[in-house]
């Protein structure tokens, strides 16, 4: 699992020892910031099991009777695997398990790995549990962002933001693909999108690489023109790159945080990639 910030670790240590801590938490941050690792660490601290490798293994493998872990299930259709939304049946099952007295620990715990993947029905059902908190249960919700989490759920959780510890590195192949795709015809872009969007995780990774590369291009152009002021010939590329960057971010967010069809979302992006 990814490490998380030492500052967050210190905060969680203090929070675990506080007699006035809330029962519901929302850990927010992009992938790679250690939200899941922090959740399991926090549970270990609250349960008095810090450093207990056997306890950690049980909760990570989802076999501990007092720790309920909810995450999206995977399904395969026509040879393609995709991540399903978290349905109300999963949340109901978790709530049923949380009703009983703890088996080994003093408290029970519920971790929802991707709160942004809850269906509306499941989110509203979860809200009932958060509105009527039990003194015997803690909820830790994980999400890459706040936009896809109901404001009513946010308001009932203590939110902890996870910063990016290291700057992400892109796949060098993505640089060449981005250069090539700008020079291609629309139908060729559509063929590329059709192939890559079969795997949701792959297309998200590609779009994230393109986002970093576009940001690098913008910084490079601005740096080169800073000494003598922004020349008129450089203004148009900057404007187009900024627009493309906005479209990239919006497309990536839609695919990552909603149930949007990756192919449809990327086809719209492909139409916007005219560079004339």
Image (tube, rainbow, N blue to C red):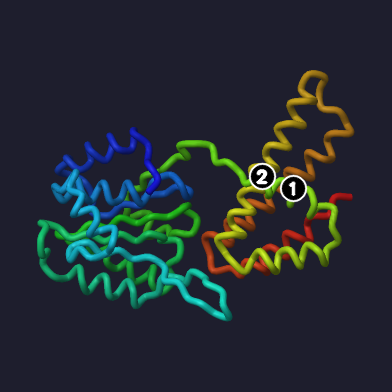
Between the C-alphas of marks 2 and 1, the distance is 7 Å
Q: Tell me if 11 is positioned left or right of 172 in this view.
A: left
Q: Which residue appears at 49% of the width and 69% of the height?
A: 83
Q: Total of numbered circles in the picture?
A: 2
Q: Position of residue 203 (x, y in %)?
A: 62, 60
Residue 172 image label: 2
Residue 94 screen position, x and y as percent = 27, 70
Residue at horizontal 84 percent and vertical 34 percent from the top: 234
| Snapshot quadrant of residue 78 | bottom right
**Quick one: label 2, few (<14), some, or many (20+) residues within 10 Å?**
few
Q: Between residues 165 and 91, which one lies in front from this camera angle?
A: 165
Image quadrant in which you'd find residue 201:
bottom right
Instruction: Answer above or below: position of 130 versus 36.
Output: below
Mark 1 Cα within 10 Å, few/some/many (few <14, many 20+)? few
Residue extending furthest toward the bottom: 78
**Residue reaching furthest top?**
227
SS at mark 2 in the image: helix
At 23% from the left and 38% from the top, the residue drawn is 13
Q: Which mark is residue 106?
A: none
Q: Position of residue 18 (x, y in %)?
A: 17, 40
Regarding mark 1 in the picture, which secondary structure is present there? helix
| Residue 195 falls left or right of residue 17 | right
CB contact under 8 Å: marks 2 and 1: yes
Relative to 87, is 58 above or below?
Answer: above
Residue 176: assigned label: 1
């Amino acid at each position: 699992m990814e490490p998380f910030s030492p500052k967050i670790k210190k905060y969680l240590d203090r929070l675990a020892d506080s007699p006035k801590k809330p029962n519901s938490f929302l850990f927010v941050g992009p992938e790679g910031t250690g939200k899941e690792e922090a959740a399991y660490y926090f549970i270990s601290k609250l349960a008095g099991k810090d450093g207990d490798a056997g306890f950690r293994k049980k909760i990570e493998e989802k076999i501990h009777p007092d720790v309920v872990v909810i995450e999206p299930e995977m399904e395969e259709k026509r040879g393609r695997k995709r991540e399903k939304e978290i349905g109300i049946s999963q949340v109901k099952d978790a709530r049923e398990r949380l009703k009983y007295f703890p088996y080994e620990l003093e408290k029970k715990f519920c971790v929802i790995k991707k709160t942004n993947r809850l269906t509306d029905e499941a989110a509203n059902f979860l809200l009932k549990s958060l509105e009527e908190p039990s003194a015997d249960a803690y909820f830790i919700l994980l999400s890459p962002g706040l936009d896809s989490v109901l404001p009513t759920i946010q308001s009932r959780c203590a939110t902890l933001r996870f910063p990016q510890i290291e700057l992400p590195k892109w796949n060098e192949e993505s640089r060449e693909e981005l250069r090539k795709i700008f020079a291609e015809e629309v139908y060729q872009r559509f063929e590329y999108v059709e192939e890559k969007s079969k795997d949701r995780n792959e297309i998200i990774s590609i779009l994230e690489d393109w986002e970093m590369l576009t940001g690098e291009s913008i910084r490079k152009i601005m740096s080169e023109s800073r000494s003598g002021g922004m020349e008129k010939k450089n203004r148009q590329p900057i404007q187009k790159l900024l627009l493309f960057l906005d479209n990239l971010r919006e497309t990536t967010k839609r695919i990552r945080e909603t149930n949007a069809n990756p192919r449809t979302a990327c086809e719209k992006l492909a139409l916007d990639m005219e560079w004339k």
